[in-house]
Amino acid sequence: TNILCDQCGLPYGRSGKGRGGVTQVKRGVELHFCCYGCSFTHSLTGEKGEGGVASMFLVRLGFSAFLSMNIMILSWVMYAGKWAWLGIEPEVIPAMNMLLFVLSTPIMILVGYPFFKNAISEIRRYRLSMDTLIALGSLAAYGYSTYEVFTGGTALYFDTGTMVIVLVTAGRYLEATAKIRTSSALHSLLELRPNVACVIRLGEEKEVQTADISVGEIVKVLPGERNALDGIIVEGRTSANESFLTGESLPVAKEPGAKVFAATINGEGAILVRTTAIESHTLHAQFVGLMEEAQRTRSPIQLLVDRISFIFIPAVIGIAAATLIGWMVFGTMTAAVLHALTVLVVSCPCALGIGTPLATTIAIARAAEEGI
């Protein structure tokens, strides 16, 4: 059985078998983390699961945003030629270029690593996605700028390479928080069904766990209580609030022979109900199952995005390669690299990769909150 990281939920260590991971013991409990980043994040926030994933992206976003803001300011000074206006001597320019390199490197290593790792895995499987293009664009900008720094050049694009990663990380953080919201809505829906019920066995009333009640047993439901399982009324008259199922706020009259459903609220009369479904087969359980399935599976629009990406990304790489070759033939090497780099960076479809799963996740959560 694979051990999962207690912070992000991914397999712990290489191949999910614990090799290369980080293990900590806190208050007598052994915790497993897939990398030092997850270990450090857990030590800061103490959260795990979906909350841990969101906090991990938040830590990465805060770290990279702080550095990238400084990179943007220094880059603006260099682009606009304001270094003289600010009283900076020309001899200081190489040091400022080196500072840009120093500020950019931690972002690429610590925050960009997941994208680069995914890109390598996708290339090996010949299944390219947005992460591949993001990794190529940011690495190309960073690599070219690093070359310029150490060869005395001035064409630096550290701000471009780092901001691509910062923006995508921001999107991943929003997506992670949306998943927490969806899980919260699911949890609220699960809490509607009571965990225990009053069952009449051999003429005696007993408090029994809902999971232990079989089909055909008689359950007593008092006024104001929620029905534990689906069933048919065998004795008593009442009304039921079924708004979570139908959206109808008015109570529905119930008499012997009428159906009642798990998680609905019994009205003013005590009733005896013969169960017709076990806990996992109730209508309420089916609703929860549908929401979980919607959360797990990819929507048609997401599948369409994947199909577009499968064609779009190789096409962008091909156009960038053709641009490089064309400018090498008819221009200079520097111009060739800059134009090829431009094609890669401007083609990073950050909005497409972020917006589709984010919109789907938020829609599911909002629908659950509104009782849809």
Image (cartoon, rainbow, N blue to C red):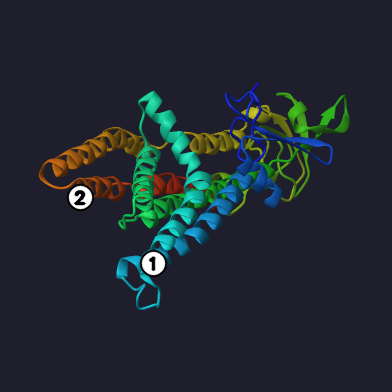
The percent coordinates of residue 22 (x first, y second) are 68, 35
User: In percent of the image, x 49 and y 48: which residue is there?
Assistant: 172
Residue tagged by mark 1? Answer: 91
How many numbered dots are placed on residues in this image?
2
In the picture, the quarter occupied by the N terminus is top right
| Direction front: furthest residue | 91
Residue 254 can be seen, yes or no: no
Question: What kind of element bears circle 2?
Answer: helix
Residue 61 can be seen, yes or no: yes
The percent coordinates of residue 64 (x first, y second) are 51, 55
Q: Relative to residue 258, is residue 341 drawn left or right? A: left
- The picture quadrant where one finds residue 330 is top left
Amino acid at dot 1: Glu
Question: What kind of element bears circle 1?
Answer: helix
Residue tagged by mark 2? Answer: 335
Give the mark nearest the N terminus, 2 or 1.
Answer: 1
| Direction left: furthest residue | 330
Q: Nearer the viewer, residue 52 or 322?
A: 322
The percent coordinates of residue 164 (x first, y second) are 39, 51
- The picture quadrant where one finds residue 286 is top right
Question: Relative to 99, is 308 above or below?
Answer: above
Q: Nearer the viewer, residue 216 or 71?
A: 71
Q: Nearer the viewer, residue 300 or 230?
A: 300
Amino acid at dot 2: Ala
